[in-house]
Amino acid sequence: MVHACTRDCYDTCIFNDTHKPLDIFPFNGFTCSRGIADLKRNSLNRIDNVYIEGKPNSIDKALDLIVKEIRKRKKEEILHVDYDGNQGLLTWYFPARLWNVIGAASTDYSICSSEGHEAIKLHYRNSIGALPEDFPKYDSFVIWGSELVFSFIHGWNLIKDKYKVTIDVRISETAKRSNKYYIVKPGSDAYLAIGIMKKLFERNWADLSLLDDPEELREYVFSFKDEEIEEATGLDSSKINELAEMYHYRRPLTIIGFALGRSINGGDAISLISLIHALIGMKKGFFYANSQGLGIDFRYLRGLHKYSPSRIVGMAEVGKEVEEGRITFMFVWNSNPLHSLPMSDRIYEAVKEGRLFLVVHDPYWSETTKIANVVLPAPTYLEKEDVVYSYWHNYLVYNKPILPKRGFTEVELMRVLAVKLEIDDDVISEDEWLAIGKATGVNVTELKTKGFVKLLPKYPEGKVRVKPLPDKLKKPNGNIIVFSSHPNYTNSQFKEIYGDKKGIVYNSEFEGIGYLSTNYGKVKVMFKRDASIPRGVFFIHKSFLFDLEGKPINSIIGFSKGKYGNTPIINIDYVETIKA
């Protein structure tokens, strides 16, 4: 039997029952430093008991307290926060049914990739792009805003010997290993995409057959002067022309990074980058994330076919709503909001002051579980049944546990809470395996027997829509924070194995202890000089989002969000530095 790594990661490796990666395409018998460490990590830093206000207690008392706190509140004040700490359908999606039946508030699930999904769908009706089988068909690649060598190791393995160009705001490790790289000013990727398309039109290299209104696109890109594009990007016209030549002659696959969606003009950039391929007659010439084109009915799994949240709270605004007292009860699973959400120090302060009642269901003692009023132990993916999908390949995997279960699964906890709340509803009582079958269209018996099956990708038909096009682009003006992946961590996970390096900020100017400051406050950090970082860019690994005093670095980010998928704009451009 098999199981799959459930990390928030493109690769979603499949392992055998001794935790060895399968030697099939595209996993090819190897995994990353996190996958290797999972067996060791599984016994470290575990939550092995129920805790109320930091003291061990019984599950009955904890559930009674949770129910009491829920009943004290309006449903609009109750928020469930869940995300992609585990990509299992029975871990992430199905347990949300309880909260949707209650009518609690829900987040908009916008923290990571939603901006790019919505931006690409404007033109292509779906965001699905190249599958792993498509990668070997290309002899060249553009890697745009992605630290591919760390965050997407099997994708990198398929292209490492091909011709590669990287576009980024710093000389990343991916850039260093590419044949050529272009360093652009932060937030200027939309301008660069416009510049490339303008050159394609100018040199009569455009193939207009895929576009529904090519003249609209031509008129739009020619409304930008060359001088404006050069000033915005920091690239002269000859460099932009080189990229246009590559797209025309080499017809590369473009790998679009999630980081772009968290940046200024991010949704516009992803939208316009995807249009480059339509302009040269390549409808499937990019890869962003394929999860929304695999035919999985995530809404059904969450019970949204019958119930709806009382309201939607943007993930950019959770901290603000907690601070304003609009959220007074928070149930967290499968995520670490104190680490990940903007303005998360507001969550910490509200719990400390008794304005927010926080319940966390988690296998590990994360930053969020450590401050919770009630902590409930959960099993890891190595200890429970689940069904796992990927946002790169199209395997659906039946996850067979290989270790004894510790704690309560998310489905078990959902149902026992429903009993305590005296909720009797078929959405909650529906057999989870029947729900999996309905949501995926897969024969569950076959899935369990074989271990994994392939889903049929669903590509929309029709011409690529040119409109809408961005009506106004911002030109960043100031120091900017940039976040990216570290090879040994998946966001806040794996600190038990590889350590916790707090508050390190790489830059070109400062060395030593100092502060990053915005209108929302300041954080104490250790500056380290790095010649690969351009002036005005402050680079932080997204696995270490706490400062030297334990304060969340995201506390200085603010509430800005993208205009398509509401993704929080983490890479902000109004940062000041103060040397200690």
Image (cartoon, rainbow, N blue to C red):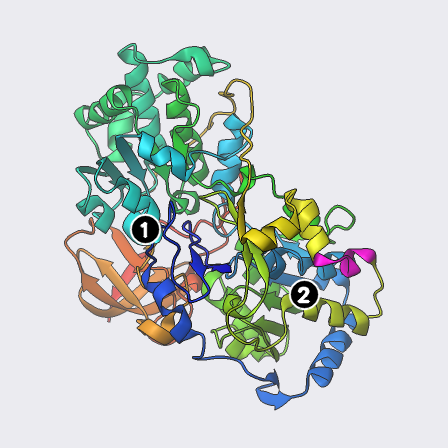
What amino acid type is highlighted by mark number 1? Ile
Residue that mark 2 sits on: 411
Which secondary structure lies at badge 1?
helix
Task: Residue 474: name its quadrant.
Answer: top left
Per the rendered image, the range of residues in magenta is 426-432
Describe residue 561's horizontal placement relative to residue 242 as left or right.
right
Residue 448 or residue 150, whichever sits in front: 448
Q: Check contact, mark 2 vs mark 1: CB within 8 A.
A: no
Q: Can you tell which quarter of the image residue 105 is in?
A: bottom right
Amino acid tagged 2? Val
Q: Report the Cα–Cα distance between label 2 and label 1.
A: 32 Å
Residue 22 appears at what percent x and percent y? 39, 55
Left or right of 333: which side holds 180? Answer: left
Q: Could you tell me residue 435's position as x and y percent? A: 71, 52
Q: Is residue 459 visible?
A: yes
Residue visible at 56% across and 79% down in the picture = 352
Give how far across and how far down residue 234 sits, in percent.
22, 35
